[in-house]
Amino acid sequence: MKKQLPPEFYELMEQLQAVDFVLVELSLYLNTHNNDFEAINQFNHYVRERKRLRKAVEAVYGPLMQFGHSFSGQPWDWDDSPWPWQL
């Protein structure tokens, strides 16, 4: 049975996905423009924003990634759905 989550969860996940998109695009750009300091500053800004959003999601809803990228609550909560790829 799929766990019901409040709209705030999906809003946070949408923000996180948007930040991930920006980080991928900036990474690709910086691969060919590695001296663009404004883009590097933007990248670092979004890295901080991603960390903030991840912490906000995980503090309330549990881990987003496995294999040491996220802490687990007690009891083990990685098997709680929905998983990030099910959204």
Image: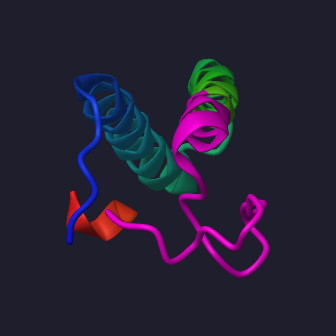
> Picture coordinates of residue 2 (x, y %)?
21, 65
Residue drawn at the location 28% of the way across and 26% of the way down: 11
Residue drawn at the location 56% of the way across and 30% of the way down: 53
Which quarter of the figure has residue 39?
top right
Residue drawn at the location 28% of the way across and 57% of the way down: 3
Q: Main secondary structure of the magenta part?
A: loop
Query: 85 or 32, which is in the foreground?
Result: 85
Q: Is residue 8 left or right of residue 35?
A: left
Q: Is residue 6 left or right of residue 60?
A: left
Residue drawn at the location 64% of the way across and 45% of the way down: 34
Q: Is residue 37 left or right of residue 63?
A: right
> Picture coordinates of residue 56 (x, y %)?
60, 29
> Picture coordinates of residue 12 (x, y %)?
38, 29
Query: 44 or 82, which is in the foreground?
Result: 82
Counting labels gives 0
Query: 26 or 54, which is in the foreground?
Result: 54
As for residue 75 lying within the magenta part, the answer is: yes
Q: Which residues are magenta?
A: 53-82
Rendered position, 14 above or below 63? above
Query: 12 or 76, which is in the foreground?
Result: 76
Rendered position, 29 above or below 51? below
> Picture coordinates of residue 85 (x, y %)?
30, 68
Name the quadrant of the N terminus: bottom left
Which quarter of the figure has residue 78?
bottom right
Name the quadrant of the C terminus: bottom left
Q: How is the image coloured?
A: rainbow
As for residue 84 lying within the magenta part, the answer is: no
